[in-house]
Image (cartoon, helix red, strand yellow):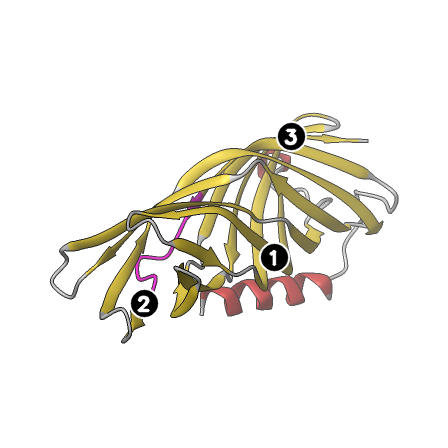
Amino acid sequence: MKLQSLVLAAATALTMTTAFAVPAGTWSIAAGAHYVDPKSDNGTLANTDLSLVANVDVDGDVRPTISGEYFIADNVGVELLAAIPFHHDFTLNDATGNELLTGKTQHLPPTLSLQYHFDGYNLPMNVKPFVGVGVNYTTFFKEKISNGADLDLDDSVGVAGHIGLDIPFAPTESLRIDARYMDIKTDASLNIDGTKYELGEVDISPWVYGVAFVKQF
């Protein structure tokens, strides 16, 4: 429902007309930091051969990020978000909440979005909201688990939504506050003594909250 609301907002914005303020051909760069906040229920992993049934709990992390946006039309931009690797600890718990195993992983979540900026609407303090939809590609690496097995998390491709607000403090400079929803799901498996054991799906699907300094060119 949250993602559907973001998509609807983006689709509505792209059909609106206004006195355009950001011309086609403009570039912007945003540098800041984002906090990845995974959903609270990250799924259940199970394998009968390993006698394993466990609920997954993935914690959050904050890292520096950078994005570049090119305006392909007035007020309509294509943005690519990048970051240094996010680090996540996770636990596998039994049905009563007792810890069975712990682990960690790193991931990179580059995200490509089509965005509409409400620039030129004469809003209070000249604030400039924006919405966007796109695709997220997340790759996992340096996976580790406490039983010493070889843990593998598959790459993920999913829909991403973006909302935010630019607060100008100079003609080409702004403070950005934003939030993204990313559909991130990964299949997990363990390799023990050369045998691969499928465990199931980990549903991370986080909200990502951030602040950034934005410069237009």
* Residue 170 or residue 87, whichever sits in front: 87
Q: Which mark lies nearer to you, 2 or 3?
A: 2
Left or right, 59 with respect to 152, comes to left
Part of the protein shown in magenta: 36-45
Looking at the rendered image, the quarter that the C terminus falls into is top right
* Residue 87 or residue 25, whichever sits in front: 87
Marks 2/3: CA–CA distance: 44 Å
Assess whether residue 41 is covered by the magenta stretch.
yes
Residue 136's tag is 1
The x, y position of residue 3, in whole percent, is 50, 65
- Asked if 127 appears above or below 136 in the picture, the reply is above
* Residue 3 or residue 47, whichever sits in front: 47
| Residue drawn at point x = 40 percent, y = 63 percent | 202
Residue 18 occupies quadrant: bottom right
Outermost residue on the top side: it is 170
Marks 1/2: CA–CA distance: 24 Å
| Residue drawn at point x = 52 percent, y = 61 percent | 154
Disc 2 crowd, CA 10 A, few/some/many (<14, 14-19, 20+):
many
Q: Name which residue type carries label 1.
A: Asn
The x, y position of residue 128, in whole percent, is 64, 42
Q: Which mark lies nearer to you, 1 or 3?
A: 1
- Asked if 37 appears above or below 85 in the picture, the reply is below
| Residue hosting label 2 | 45
The numbered mark, 1 or 2, whose residue comes first in the sequence reads: 2
Left or right, 104 with respect to 118, comes to left
The numbered mark, 2 or 3, whose residue comes first in the sequence reads: 2
Q: Name which residue type carries label 2.
A: Leu
Disc 3 crowd, CA 10 A, few/some/many (<14, 14-19, 20+):
many
Residue 174's tag is 3
Under circle 2, the secondary element is strand
